[in-house]
Image (tube, rainbow, N blue to C red):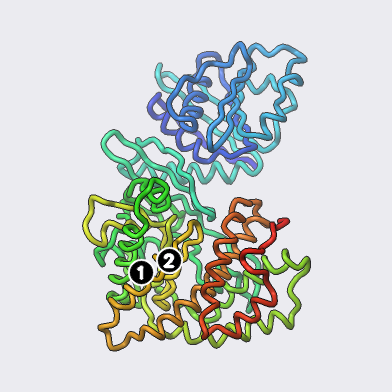
């Protein structure tokens, strides 16, 4: 399969913009070939790609050395110029090793013979009648065809916005398939979210895939709707400057880089940050979500309910992914039925109690510190496309039992008490009931996270998440200690080791 994209009259500034967009799509194992006559601009484009990945710095021509290697945190790039390649030298260059560790940019690819892999991006550059303009023909071969189509769609979207001339700087994303970039103009920046519609996975129950069972967003529509609703409530969700719901592109307000986790690492007082974040949840508790959220120019979005079956499906990730690793076999059906029977009455109560906004991933990686703003606006909100209408305790436990960093038990206890005290004036609020909900939803969420992190390690090869398992297991033990969860605690104690004795997982 091949996809072809032709660009005419590309001048130097435009070439740099195109390079920045192509650089976003590159990943280890990619080969990009650059063909064209002498002086066409192959090295110019190669240098632009290298600079967009490496940042500013000297990018020497590899004409005489044949290969020039660049190491970055994101990628290793090897820039090759085969113009002076002699017969028989190709096998001595170690191209296979270079490809295994990163990206190859190859000028004069015709001299590489039959070494070139089938899956690659070919770029042909030629002169035009205009001295400083070039014609580019990009051909995506094999699986690169779909990726090139995505870059072309992205370019078409950006070119219709005020950020058509912006360079794009790659930003590290999360565990999802979304990707991010910072769009940079001389006088302003913005954030590009690239979130293609996710196809449903295989059905796992009632003919539905996991994403439908637990009400995960499958496109950017929920993000746009929830962002607008949060901003209407005077909260710091990013403004949306442009969007394409069908293709999954958004241009967002740039809230900076002061993520809560980074602030803690720099010595910022956790009590200050977490207290401000709790204040946001208190504000949301007083502003329940409507059933439908408006989207300018589109049909309203219906906010799903966090029902008991969705919660159980999430918690079951623990027995789908972690239990089999610990025991060397899938969990027997009788134990699975016992697990579900213990959880169902607890989750049925949680699904109908103290309902309001559930942003769902309300924890340090998704919270920004904006000290120049006032009150609740000091907390920037990043990740809420999976928002639901459900029990308010869910987001509070997400924050106070953060999976990515240790929240001191004393801080958790103080903020939980402060939250309950602030809401105690309402005749509909019961502190005792809320503590039961908090423990129940903490146990549910931490069970889910243990399963997700195990899945990311085993299925996706992302073993870095295993470092968080002991912390999440400690939170889980803390939640299960509540008297209302006594029977559930007994099951967990039989089936899982204590947090302090969780073995290294052979995933």
The quarter of the picture where the N terminus appears is top right
Question: Which circle marks residue 162 in the picture?
Answer: none
Which one is earlier in the sequence, the residue at label 2 or at label 1?
A: 2
Where is residue 100 shown, x and y percent of the image?
Answer: 68, 35
Q: Quadrant of the C terminus?
A: bottom right
Rendered image quadrant of residue 124 = top right
Total marks in image? 2
Dot 2: element: helix
Q: Is residue 107 above or below residue 64?
A: below
> In the rendered view, does 323 fall on the left or right side of 148?
right
Residue identified by numbered label 1: 415
Identify which residue, 312 or 231, lies in the foreground: 312
**36 relative position to 350: left or right:** right
User: How far across and down, in percent of the image, does residue 145 sit?
Assistant: 60, 42
At 53% from the left edge and 41% from the top edge, which residue is drawn? 25
The answer to whether one can see residue 221 in this image is no
- Residue at screen point 36% across, 65% down: 226
Q: Residue at x 38, y 43 (%)?
A: 158
Vertical side of 431 occupied by 416: above or below: above
> Does the residue at mark 2 contact the one at mark 1 (Cβ under 8 Å)?
yes
The residue under label 2 is: 400
The one nearer the camera, 504 or 298, is 504
Label 1 crowd bin: few (<14), some (14–19), many (20+), radius 10 Å: some
* Image spot of residue 153 (x, y percent): 47, 46
Q: Is 168 placed above or below 246 here?
A: above
Give the structural element (helix, strand or loop) at label 1: helix
Q: Position of residue 78 (x, y in %)?
A: 60, 26
């Amino acid at each position: 399969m091949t996809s072809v994209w032709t660009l005419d009259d590309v001048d130097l500034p435009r070439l740099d913009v195109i390079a920045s967009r192509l650089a976003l799509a590159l990943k280890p194992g990619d080969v990009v070939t650059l063909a064209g006559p002498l002086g066409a601009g192959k090295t110019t484009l190669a240098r632009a790609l290298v600079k967009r990945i490496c940042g500013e710095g000297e990018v020497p021509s590899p004409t005489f050395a044949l290969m020039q290697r660049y190491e970055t945190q994101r990628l290793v790039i090897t820039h090759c110029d085969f113009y002076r390649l002699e017969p028989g030298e190709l096998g001595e260059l170690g191209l296979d090793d270079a490809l295994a560790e990163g990206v190859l940019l190859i000028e004069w690819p015709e001299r590489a013979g039959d070494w070139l892999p089938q899956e690659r991006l070919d770029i042909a550059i030629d002169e035009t009648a205009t001295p400083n303009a070039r014609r580019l023909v990009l051909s995506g071969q094999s699986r690169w065809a779909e990726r090139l189509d995505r870059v072309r769609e992205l370019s078409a979207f950006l070119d219709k916005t005020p950020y058509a001339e912006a360079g794009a700087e790659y930003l590290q994303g999360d565990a999802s398939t979304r990707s991010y970039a910072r769009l940079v103009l001389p006088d302003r920046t913005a954030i590009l979210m690239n979130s293609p519609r996710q196809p449903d996975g295989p059905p796992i129950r009632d003919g539905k895939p996991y994403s439908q069972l637990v009400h995960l967003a499958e496109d950017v529509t929920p993000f746009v709707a929830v962002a607008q609703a949060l901003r209407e409530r005077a909260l710091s969700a990013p403004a949306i400057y442009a969007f394409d719901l069908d293709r999954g592109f958004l241009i967002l307000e740039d809230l900076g880089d002061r993520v809560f986790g980074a602030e803690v690492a720099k010595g910022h007082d956790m009590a200050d940050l977490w207290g401000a974040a709790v204040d946001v949840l208190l504000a949301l508790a007083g502003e329940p979500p409507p059933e439908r959220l408006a989207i300018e120019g589109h049909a309203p979005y219906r906010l799903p309910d966090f029902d008991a079956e969705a919660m159980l499906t999430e918690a079951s990730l623990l027995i789908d992914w972690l239990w089999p690793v610990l025991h060397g076999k899938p969990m027997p059906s009788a134990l699975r039925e016992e697990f579900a029977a213990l959880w169902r009455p607890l989750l049925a109560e949680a699904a109908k109690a103290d309902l309001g906004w559930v942003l769902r991933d309300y924890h340090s990686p998704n919270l920004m510190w904006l000290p120049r703003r006032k009150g609740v606006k000091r907390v920037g909100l990043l990740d809420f496309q999976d928002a639901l209408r459900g029990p308010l305790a869910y987001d509070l436990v997400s924050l106070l039992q953060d999976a990515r960093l240790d929240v001191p038990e004393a801080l958790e206890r103080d903020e939980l008490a402060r939250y309950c005290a602030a809401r105690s004036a309402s005749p509909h609020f019961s502190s005792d009931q809320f503590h039961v909900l908090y423990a129940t939803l903490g146990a549910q969420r931490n069970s889910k996270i243990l399963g997700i992190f195990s899945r990311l390690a085993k299925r996706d090869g992302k073993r870095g998440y295993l470092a968080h398992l002991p912390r999440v297991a400690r939170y889980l033990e803390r939640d299960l200690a509540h008297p209302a969860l006594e029977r559930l605690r007994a099951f967990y104690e039989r089936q899982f080791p204590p947090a302090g004795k969780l073995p290294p997982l052979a995933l």
